[in-house]
Amino acid sequence: MTAGRFISLEGGEGAGKSTQATRLAEALGRQGIDARVTREPGGSEGAEAIRALLLAGAVTRWSAHSETLLFAAARADHVERTIRPAIEAGAWVICDRFIDSTRAYQGAQGIDDAAILALHGFGSKGLLPDRTLVLEIGPDEGAARASVRDAGALDRFAARGPAFHQDVAAAFRRIANREPDRVRLIDATGEADDVTARLIEHIADLLP
Ligand code: TMP
């Protein structure tokens, strides 16, 4: 049995993460790898229930601190019930968002990175992906794609202004610069096929 692997896809709104997660899993499947797609917030029954609390309602529904705790709680359930069992069974887990989304989105609201990582240590035993691929597109393109996808009904995060989304993008770049072995910035503009090929290039060293 080959070792299971854990890959997260990250980036701002409308970067094409969920499409690419599916495409990446299909490409791995063609190589005989059992690849499973999951997402955050969500990915287990309890975490999906927390997702509904997090994404609906007014932008101000949760404070940055309570929101950070809810994301950490959702992630703890997701890791324990879905991600770890799959990796232990030898599967590859492709996760649409993970801890770096909390570092970027809640970090952009003033929550300290060390506090976020400490919570992650407690809730999810500090599990980190083997590789994190940050999909980058221009902010205008992202907002346009997200609003088409959401048909104008943006969730609490997508509804924030452009300055917030620029802070989030900057935070992802900062994480990538600090952790170059794990985190890679990927040009996500252009044809979906070309983007998938770039993703595969950046996980090639992990393949059996
Ligand atoms: P998505 O399903 O469109 O990716 O929506 C999830 C939203 O939640 C997105 O706007 C990013 C936000 N989010 C955080 O703020 N912190 C997190 O830890 C995660 C996983 C998502």
Image (tube, grey):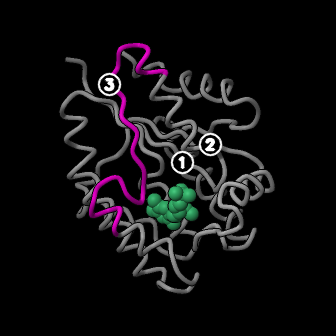
Q: Is residue 28 left or right of residue 139?
A: left
**Residue 50: horizontal and vertical position, in percent?**
35, 69
Horizontal side, residue 35 vs residue 164: left or right: left
Q: Mark 3 points at which residue?
A: 34
> What secondary structure is found at the residue carrying circle 1?
strand
Kindly state the secondary structure of the residue where label 2 is placed.
strand
How far apart marks 1 and 3 lie (CA) works out to 21 Å
State if disc 1 and disc 2 touch (CB < 8 Å). Answer: yes
- Viewport quadrant of the N terminus: top left
Q: Badge 1 is on which residue?
A: 10
| Mark 3–mark 2 distance (CA, rounded to whole Å) | 23 Å
Residue type, label 1: Glu
Indicate the amino acid at tag 3. Answer: Asp
Residue type highlighted by circle 2? Leu
| Residue that appears at 71% across and 62% down | 166
Q: Mark 2 points at which residue?
A: 135
Pointer 1 and pointer 3: residues touching (CB < 8 Å)? no
Magenta-span inclusion, residue 82: no
Residue 9 in the image: x percent, y percent?
Answer: 51, 43
- Sequence-wise first label, 1 or 3: 1
Of the numbered discs 2 and 1, the one sitting upstream in the chain is 1
Q: Check the image and report above or below for 174 versus 192.
A: below
**How would you rate the neighbour count of disc 3 (Cα within 10 Å): few for under 14, some for 14-19, many for 20 or more?**
some
Instruction: Name above or below for residue 66 compared with residue 143.
Output: below
**Quadrant location of the C terminus?**
top left
Q: Which residue lies furthest to the right in this view?
A: 140
